[in-house]
Image: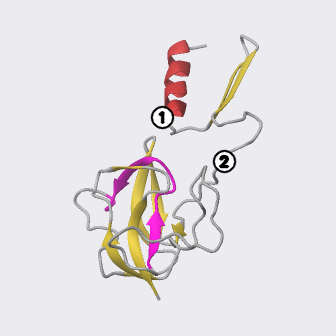
Amino acid sequence: MDLKLIRNLIRLMERGEVTELKIEDEQAHLKVHLRRGPEAGSGPQVLMVPGSAHSPAAGPAPVGLPPQEGSAPAPPPGRAEGLIEITSPMVGTFYHAPSPDDDPFSSVGDDLEEDTVVCIVEAMKVMNEIRAECRGSIVELLVENGEPVEFGQPLFLVKPR
């Protein structure tokens, strides 16, 4: 078994890029199963759905904070109510166009359908197309091209129609 490879895979888990890892070496009769999270048997805490779009008023409470009854979360300062956030479904690098020489997938003012590709998030050398999953028009682009993004980070603000 290559210990250097295992150490690198564990580092990916520590950075949050991998949540579960299974390694089997039939020659050494060795099996290793690692799962990142508070309890090994609890399963993943968050279901990552590519291109998920959430309204700030309808989104889940932040992890670790109980939902407060009768109060909807206020939009961040300077943002109008009723806008939908298109968020990153994973940790990675945000790309606004398929390549540096191509036009961007979408721009401020563009009309979107649920299946419209709005950007790419690269994670571990895999280019993941992010779809709008809502109908409306782009009001604001919140991330710069080539910028690292976190899971759940808002990428676009959309005015629904």
Q: Is mark 2 on a helix, strand or loop?
A: loop
Quarter of the image for the N terminus: give it: top right
Where is residue 99 shown, x and y percent of the image? 29, 57
Residue 93 in magenta? Answer: yes
Specify whether 6 is left or right of 22: left
Residue appearing at x 49%, y 27% in the figure: 11
Q: Mark 1 points at which residue?
A: 15
Whether pointer 2 and pointer 1 mark residues with C-beta atoms closer than 8 Å, the reply is no
Give, as a three-letter code, the residue at label 2.
Gln
Q: Quadrant of residue 43?
A: top right
* Residue closest to the eye, 21 or 151: 151
Give, as a three-letter code, the residue at label 1.
Arg
Residue appearing at x 22%, y 60% in the figure: 101
Q: In this view, does 4 lie above or below 100?
A: above
* Residue closest to the eye, 51 or 151: 151
Which portion, as a residue range, is magenta? Answer: 83-98
Q: Neighbour class for label 1 at 10 Å: few (<14), some, many (≥20)?
A: few
Q: Is mark 1 on a helix, strand or loop?
A: loop
Residue appearing at x 26%, y 63% in the figure: 102
Picture disc at residue 45: 2
Sequence-earlier tag: 2 or 1? 1
